[in-house]
Amino acid sequence: MEENLLSIEDIDFEFENTLVKVVAIRSHPEVKVAGETIGPLEEGREFQVKYWIARELVKSGIARFHDEDRMDLIGLHKLYWRETVQTGRQLSPLPDNFYPKLRRFIMELKEKSTSDQAKAQEYDKVLRLAQDIVSCRLKKIISLAAGPAQTDNVLGSLSQEERLVYNYVYNFASKWRSKVLKFEGVSK
């Protein structure tokens, strides 16, 4: 089993530094963010920046995230349906950076829910769906990890965060199994 897996915090840090697409909402001269120069920006034009820079540009009203880099309730519903329909220990691949995007989507809705009743309802729905998806996938991952080692084909459907769980449970279960089945002093 892989032992050099990143922590969830490491994965989150990597996500903050991945390139994402944003669209300029309005034309704007050059912008300096933490020593990086972006622009000049032309309204409606797409460009790529690191996620943490994109977040600041969005907060400033200069840009918006490109639709493909956003999570929404409809996409979450589709994923929930796909995950719960699959039988047994079958896992569908998640979209790239699913968990970091999910965490940020939930945080964004939570912030907006304090002043917007519709966002508060959406927040509740998203939170329930997220919890159901995570619980469903976690049960499948634990079931896979408690058995024999899985093929790369099966493990390829796991996100980095899910591999942490799989490896931990697999290693723990393997050690436990060998200790429980160890028969000292018994001769054949």
Image (tube, rainbow, N blue to C red):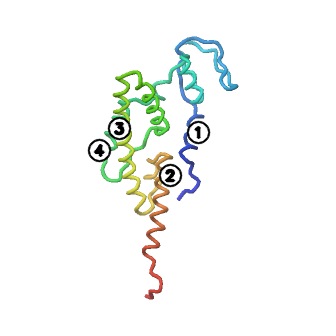
The residues bearing labels 4 and 2 have C-alpha atoms spaced at a distance of 24 Å
Q: Which residue is mark 1?
A: 13
Residue nearest the viewer, comparing 180 with 47? 180
Q: Which residue is mark 4?
A: 85
Q: Identify the mark nearer the N-term, 3 or 2.
A: 3
Q: Mark 4–mark 2 contact, CB under 8 Å? A: no
The residues bearing labels 3 and 2 have C-alpha atoms spaced at a distance of 22 Å
Q: Please tell me which residue is depicted at 34% across the width and 38% down the height of the picture.
A: 128
Q: Which residue is mark 3?
A: 129
Task: Classify 10 Å Cα crowding around label 3: few (below 14), some (14-19), many (20 and above).
Answer: some
Q: Identify the mark nearer the N-term, 3 or 4.
A: 4
Q: Which residue is mark 2?
A: 164
Please state the horizontal and vertical placement of residue 37, each as a whole percent of the image. Answer: 68, 21
**What kind of element bears circle 2?**
helix
Horizontally, is 187 left or right of 11 in the view? left
Q: Identify the mark nearer the N-term, 3 or 1.
A: 1
Please state the horizontal and vertical placement of residue 105, each as a whole percent of the image. Answer: 45, 31
Q: Amino acid at mark 2?
A: Leu
Q: Amino acid at mark 4?
A: Val
Using the rendered view, name the quadrant where residue 187 is placed: bottom left
Q: Identify the mark nearer the N-term, 4 or 2.
A: 4
Q: Identify the mark nearer the N-term, 1 or 4.
A: 1
